[in-house]
């Protein structure tokens, strides 16, 4: 007998000038709301090209939901950990709605089992979740991989008009924002046609790798920079981050 996942999922969206400004989600009869989804809290695309700045990392909690909190930050310009459950439901619904695309072979577990798993607060997000969120919000999510000094661009083939940036060190995601040199307001969402920020992100990836700001999860010994404790392996690092809230790790050279 085939498993069936019966979920009620209704979206009420407000769109102005081709931009999604607010969204009310009714999921299994529980309403959740997220405002200003289409762009960050302060975005002036007309003046952006003339405003020099520095791409910076915004540290978010290491609470197993750092990917979702990071996406929430680049959308709304604030750290709000409550958005994680909302995004988990978005992902679970998308996966349940398309069992052919999101098969057991693709997910690494049965579709229904994955949907139950991703809704748990201790489930870590990754490439699958980023691709779904990119499609849902209609923007490219560029993730700086500080392990390999590359940028993974989710939604690149969709030619979205806007792009946001995250950085990933092997176990933790943080969002990136542009800090203007003139002391103006920060920016978290950028036109995809602007190559300047993309080049700066690529340089940031190289610098992060050279300074060993990454965790090689396959083979590594690392130190918690916050408390100087030595750790061995991905499981130990994840548990330490969960137990202490520490999120700054550096690989120890062999």
Image (cartoon, grey):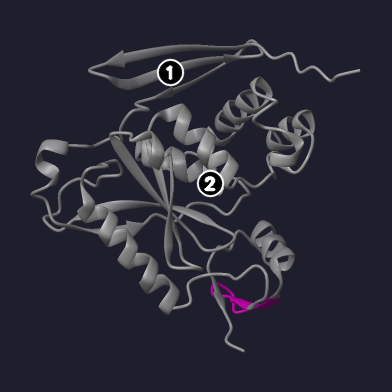
The quadrant of the picture occupied by the C terminus is: bottom right
Q: Which residues are magenta?
A: 222-231
Distance from Cα at disc 2 to Cα at disc 1: 20 Å
4 to the left or right of 166: right
Query: SS at mark 2?
Result: helix
Classify mark 1: residues with Cα within 10 Å, few (<14), some (14-19) or many (20+).
some
| Residue located at (65% from left, 23% from top) | 98
**Is 33 or 245 nearer to us in this picture?**
33
Name the residue: 51% across, 68% down.
Answer: 147
Residue tagged 1: 23
- What is the secondary structure assignment of the residue under circle 1? strand
**Residue 78 at least partly seen:** no
Residue 102 placement (x, y as % from top left): 67, 32
Decide whether residue 215 is among the magenta residues.
Answer: no
* Residue with the mark numbered 2: 67
In the picture, the disc for residue 224 is none
């Amino acid at each position: 007998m085939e498993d069936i996942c019966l979920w009620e999922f209704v979206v009420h969206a407000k769109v102005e000038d081709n931009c999604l400004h607010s969204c009310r989600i009714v999921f299994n009869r529980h309403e959740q709301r997220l405002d200003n989804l289409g762009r960050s809290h302060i975005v002036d695309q007309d003046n952006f090209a003339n405003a020099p700045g520095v791409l910076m990392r915004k540290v978010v909690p290491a609470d197993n939901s750092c990917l979702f909190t990071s996406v929430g930050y680049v959308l709304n310009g604030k750290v709000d950990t409550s958005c994680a459950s909302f995004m988990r439901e978005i992902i679970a619904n998308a996966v349940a709605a398309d069992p052919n695309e999101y098969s057991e072979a693709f997910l690494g577990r049965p579709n229904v089992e994955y949907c139950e798993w991703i809704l748990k607060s201790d489930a870590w997000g990754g490439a699958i979740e980023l691709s779904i969120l990119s499609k849902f919000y209609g923007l490219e999510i560029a993730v700086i991989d500080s392990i390999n000094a590359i940028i993974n661009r989710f939604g690149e083939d969709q030619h979205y008009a806007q792009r946001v940036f995250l950085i990933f060190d092997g176990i933790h995601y943080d969002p990136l924002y542009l800090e203007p040199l003139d002391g103006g307001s920060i920016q978290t969402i950028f036109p995809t046609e602007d190559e300047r920020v993309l080049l700066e992100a690529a340089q940031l990836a190289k610098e992060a790798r050279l300074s060993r700001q990454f965790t090689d999860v396959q083979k590594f010994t690392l130190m918690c920079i916050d408390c100087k404790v030595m750790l061995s392996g991905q499981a130990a690092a994840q548990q330490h981050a969960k137990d202490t809230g520490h999120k700054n790790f550096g690989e120890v050279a062999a």
